[in-house]
Amino acid sequence: MTVSPDFFETFNFNFLDGNRSTVFKDQSNVVITAEAASKLFPNADAMGKSVVQKGWNGKREYFTVTGIIENIPANTHFKGDVFFPKVDRQETLNFHGYSGTPQYVLLKANADVKKLGGKISKTFTKYNLSPEVGIQFLPVTDIHLHSAGINNPSANMSDIKYVYIFGCVAFLILVIGCINYVNLTTAQALGRVREVGIRKTLGGGKHQLAFQFIGESFLFFSIATVLAMVLSMIGWPVFSNFLLIKLPLNYLFNFKNLALFFGIGLTAGVLSGMYPAFFLSRMQPAGILKDRQGGLKINFSLRKMLIVFQFSISMVMVIATIVVWQQLDLFNNRPLGFDKNHLLILPAVDISKNKDAFKKTLLDNPNLESVSFVGMKLGENFGNSSSMPSPFDSTRRLDFAFISADLDFIKTMGIEMKQGWAFSRNFSTDVMAYDSLMEDFTKRGEHARAEALHYQKPIIITESVAKAIGIQNPVDSILKLGAVQGRVVGVAKNFQITSLKKVSPLLVYNPLTFFAISSTYIRVSSKNMPASIQHIEKSWKQFFPDEEFKYSFADENMQKMYESENRLASLFTVFALFAIGISALGLFSLVALIVRQRTKEIGIRKVMGASVSGIAILLTKDFVVLIIVSAVIASPIAWFGMNQWLQDFAHRVDIRWWTFGIAGLLVLLTGLITVSFQTIRAAKMNPVDSLKRE
């Protein structure tokens, strides 16, 4: 991690060795963490030792360890174990006002951030910077969860919206569980009629009984909270690995979190126990002698409303799960315009001296079909980028990205040409060293020839570029636009090498004439892949013995860009299953209660000749209606919520009608299976036993 010399005076990292004021006294100094020290210099004192880094030009740079700090906690936004000093450079203000390095400002305790921002904005105006240039201060404490859209590869950043999503889901599942407790407790009320009657006969008051039942609820939820914490402790390692975070268990069970857990559990226990408590405490002893309900009438309308609420939540989660999986499927399977399969990528190294020999050695293996040296990292960044106003609308800007690669890029990537040709060694204009020639012309003062040669440099553009700049026959066109300059030799079909979450910039492919740090892209045959990788490793070690051999595949790299969506899909699947299961349990308890209330009716109907199937249908149809009502309520809510989520993606699925149909059918089948156990059992009861018991 490269930092400014005053970095450790701005941030209060704890130094185990070294002086924070002098650790960067020299540009060849370096500060490392305790963990890095133990890895780099095991069983030795790291202070004063040398650390070697390879610079952008491939040359080794030596640094002396002048400080050791404590390991950076996992819950900070910084990611780094080795800190190199950055050379301060004076730069003239440019029309972008752009800096690719994150800037941190340490303010005084009473500083007014708005006033400071206003003063800096006046500087932008003074130097006539673009109106688009602005400044916005973000507190360090907000970086992790409130910095969506800010590109900082060295920071550990997430998005607060996922905290809200999972928080809401957890809360709704808790509500479903509380509703079930209310329904189950009320369903058991009839079994406690005699207990309540005896207690009231012996002098028990209504409030005393109510507090007793609330106390029972409080006890149940207290035990459930403790069990939940035990399960959390057991599952925390797996869960934290799943979320790609490395936090010890004490972060989960700190005082604040413990207070929150017990507060939620105990509050839920009291609220869930209030209705059953007052319901049971209203029973009259005299009523117990008259009927089995103690003079109470159970409000089934309220319970049906609660069931509708439960299944509405369940269906929303099912719809959300289906949509997330659909979006993930689009990310993984949408055609990208290049062949990502069997495309192996080696890390960037200095290939300037060995490019031809290295490529020839690789291609000696017949299973390696093509090799290209490329100055970009697939899915992450391009070599260069620029922007310009649209020729048709000055208020709209066109964003361009420039891919610098050798002549085999199109072939290796499997990109299809629409017009013209891919670069070829058979054309002298494609292999000419334009940069060297222009430099020679400039040195000789022949600026006109240098400029003319500059516009003759061959480029390949995509269809989207041709459309954006408005040229009908682009091949052999000379482009002299602000962002795009050169002679178009071909037009490639559109291809996307960045995340489908964002709109791809307009791509321009420049042939590399000067090779330095480049990645190696290899098109590998599917035949005998292990042997091909062994050959690649052998060739790598032959030409780059000091470099670690690592490789990746393009399809895996592209898939890594959607890790957060993968986790979201998996978590939603688990949550949806939980919600459906808990809702089914609630429905089961309601059916049991209704069957118990209608035992006499069922017996009379059977005596009158009703069939088992007829009684089962009679008891089931009301619940089918409840589930249908749930689907009607849940569908627009789920549609709105998932549309809001999809707005963040440039390429997104359409929510089809059959998504709601599948979710509704799944919830309906779950409900029918749940209801059928009770209704069929009730319909098969011997009417003599049921009437005698009544």
Image: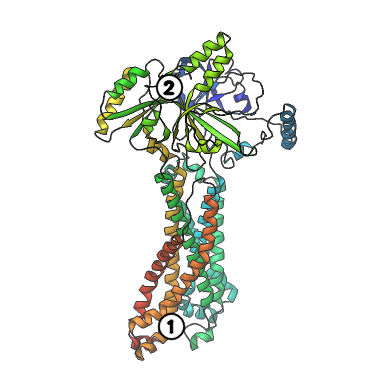
Q: Residues within 10 Å of mark 2 (few under 14, many from 20)?
A: many
Would you place residue 258 above or below residue 30 in this image?
below
Q: Residue 105: percent from the left, percent from the top?
A: 66, 30
Q: Say what amino acid the circle numbered 1 marks.
A: Arg
Q: Residue at x 43, y 83 (%)?
A: 598
Q: Residue 324: percent from the left, percent from the top?
A: 46, 52
Residue wearing tag 1: 598
Q: Distance between the residues labelled 2 and 1?
A: 88 Å
Residue located farthest toward the bottom when viewing the structure as drawn: 608
Quarter assignment of residue 99: top right
Asked whether the viewer can see residue 227, the reply is: no
Residue wearing tag 2: 430
Q: Do callouts 2 and 1 mark residues in contact (Cβ within 8 Å)?
A: no
Q: Is mark 1 on a helix, strand or loop?
A: loop
Q: How many marks?
A: 2
Would you place residue 336 above or below residue 681 in this image?
above
Q: Which residue is drawn at 72% across and 34% down?
A: 117
Q: Residue at x 42, y 54 (%)?
A: 573
Q: Residue 667: percent from the left, percent from the top?
A: 42, 65
Would you place residue 147 above or below residue 283 in this image?
above
Q: Residues within 10 Å of mark 1 (few under 14, many from 20)?
A: some
The colour scheme of the drawn protein is rainbow
Instruction: From the viewer's side, name the closer residue of 679 and 630.
Output: 630
Q: Give the quarter of the figure containing the C terminus.
A: bottom left
Residue 111 located left or right of residue 22: right
Asked whether the viewer can see residue 58, the reply is: yes
Kindly report which numbered mark, 2 or 1, lies closer to the viewer in this rendering.
2
Instruction: From the viewer's side, name the closer residue of 641 and 232.
Output: 641
Q: Say what amino acid the circle numbered 2 marks.
A: Asp
Q: What element carries label 2?
A: helix
Q: Residue at x 41, y 83 (%)?
A: 599
Q: Residue 88: percent from the left, percent from the top?
A: 61, 19
